[in-house]
C-alpha cells in the first residue's frame, strides 16, 4: 500500500488512520466535495481531478487559502514561532490572546498553526464569545510541519476552499461530484460532547438534515459517503444508505493507553449513475515522522 500523507495540523477526530477504509468506499468522480474538511487527510490521500473543500471554521479556511497562495512566506514566518522561548505556558497564553484580539487574516493564520501545535492535544475549541480557549499542551518540542505544509500547498492547487454551511455546499454541488461528509460525531454519552468547534454547534437536527441532504443528492446523481459513530440513532437516520461498521481507536485522549476502541459507521449513498468501485487512488507520498 502507498504511504499516507499527514496533514500539517493536529486534529482531534482526524481521518488519517481511516484513510485506507475510506478509500475503499469513495467512488471515482470528477470532483470530491468535503463540507467538513477538517485537517484534510482525505483530500491529501486521494487523487480526484478537483476538490471543493469547505468548513464552517473561518480561521481554518483562511489558513488553507494563505498556504495555498503564499506557502514560502508563510512557512518562513511560521517557523519562527517554533522555538524554545515560544514553548512556554506564558508565551502560549500571550499568543492565544493576540490571536483572539487580531483581525488580520495572515497573523491569525500564523497563530492558528502555532496554537494547534502547542495547544492541548490538537483541539480546536472556541467559547460562546468566539474566543479560542484551548489550554497549553506542555509538549517537549512541538513539531514544525514544514514538509506537510509544502505538500498541502502543492495539492491545494487543485482545490477551491469555502467557508459556508453544509446546507449551502449541498445546494451548489457540481454535476456528478462525489461528497465525503465527516460531521461532528454524535456523542456516545451525555457528557461526551465537550468540544465547541464553532459557535453554531452541530446538534441532532443537523445530523438528521445531513442524512436527508445525502438522500436528495443521491437522487440527483451524486454519491455521498458519511462517517460517524455507530449508534442506534445514526443507523436510523442513515437507513437509506449502505452501512458498514468497523472498530477504530480513539484519538482524543492524551493518554494513549486509555483511549480504547469505538465502532465507526460508514454510510454510502451510491448514485445509480456512479461508475462504482474500485475507488479513488491514494497518492504515493513519503510520510514525515512526527
Image (cartoon, helix red, strand yellow):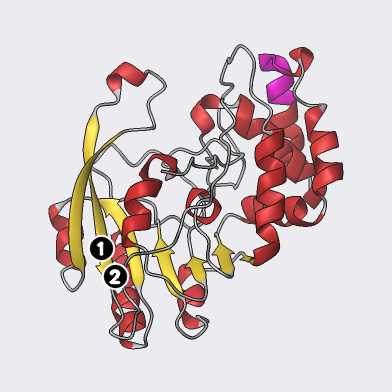
When the figure is inspected, residue 81 is found, relative to residue 195, above or below; the finding is above
Residue ID for mark 2: 211
Q: Quadrant of the N terminus?
A: top left
Q: Nearer the viewer, residue 222 or 87?
A: 222
Residue in view at x 50 percent, y 80 percent: 173
Q: Which mark is residue 4?
A: none
Residue 289 in view: yes
Q: Are marks 1 and 2 in contact (CB under 8 Å)?
A: yes
* Mark 1 to mark 2 CA distance (whole Å): 9 Å
Q: Nearer the viewer, residue 62 or 196?
A: 62
What stretch of residues is rendered in magenta? 87-94
Q: Nearer the viewer, residue 49 or 96?
A: 49
Residue ID for mark 1: 267
Within the magenta stretch, is there residue 54? no
Residue in view at x 53 percent, y 52 percent: 283
Prevailing secondary structure class for the magenta stretch in the rendered image: helix
Which structural element holds mark 1? Answer: strand
Q: Earlier in the sequence, mark 1 or mark 2?
A: 2
Q: Quadrant of the C terminus?
A: top right
Q: Residues within 10 Å of mark 2 (few under 14, many from 20)?
A: many
Residue 59's x, y, as percent? Answer: 66, 50
Which structural element holds mark 2? Answer: helix
- The mark lying in front, picked from 1 and 2, is 1
Residue in view at x 75 percent, y 19 percent: 86
Q: Is residue 81 left or right of residue 147?
A: right
Amino acid at each position: 500500500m502507498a504511504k499516507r500523507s499527514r496533514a500539517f495540523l493536529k486534529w482531534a477526530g482526524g481521518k488519517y488512520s481511516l484513510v485506507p477504509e475510506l478509500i475503499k468506499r469513495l467512488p471515482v468522480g470528477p470532483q470530491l466535495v468535503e463540507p467538513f474538511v477538517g485537517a484534510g487527510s482525505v483530500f491529501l490521500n486521494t487523487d480526484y481531478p478537483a476538490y471543493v473543500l469547505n468548513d464552517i471554521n473561518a480561521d481554518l479556511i483562511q489558513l488553507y487559502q494563505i498556504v495555498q497562495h503564499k506557502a514560502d512566506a508563510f512557512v518562513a514566518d511560521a517557523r519562527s514561532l517554533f522555538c524554545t522561548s515560544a514553548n512556554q505556558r506564558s508565551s502560549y497564553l500571550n499568543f492565544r490572546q493576540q490571536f483572539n484580539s487580531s483581525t488580520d487574516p495572515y497573523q491569525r493564520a500564523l497563530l492558528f498553526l502555532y496554537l494547534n501545535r502547542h495547544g492541548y492535544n490538537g483541539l480546536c475549541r472556541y467559547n460562546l464569545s468566539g474566543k479560542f480557549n484551548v489550554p497549553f499542551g506542555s509538549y517537549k518540542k512541538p513539531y514544525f510541519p514544514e514538509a506537510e505544509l509544502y505538500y498541502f500547498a502543492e495539492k491545494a492547487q487543485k482545490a477551491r476552499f469555502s467557508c459556508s454551511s453544509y446546507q449551502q455546499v449541498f445546494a451548489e454541488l457540481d454535476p456528478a461530484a462525489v461528497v465525503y461528509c465527516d460531521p461532528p460525531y454524535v456523542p456516545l454519552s451525555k457528557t461526551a460532547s465537550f468540544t465547541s468547534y464553532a459557535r453554531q454547534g452541530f446538534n441532532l437536527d443537523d445530523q438528521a438534515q445531513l442524512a436527508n441532504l445525502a438522500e436528495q443528492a443521491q437522487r440527483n446523481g451524486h454519491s455521498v459517503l458519511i462517517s460517524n459513530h455507530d449508534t442506534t440513532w445514526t443507523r436510523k437516520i442513515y437507513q437509506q444508505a449502505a452501512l458498514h461498521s468497523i472498530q477504530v481507536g480513539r484519538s482524543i485522549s492524551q493518554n494513549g493507553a486509555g483511549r480504547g476502541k469505538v465502532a465507526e459507521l460508514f454510510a454510502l449513498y451510491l448514485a445509480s449513475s456512479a461508475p462504482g468501485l474500485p475507488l479513488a487512488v491514494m497518492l504515493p507520498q513519503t510520510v514525515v515522522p512526527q
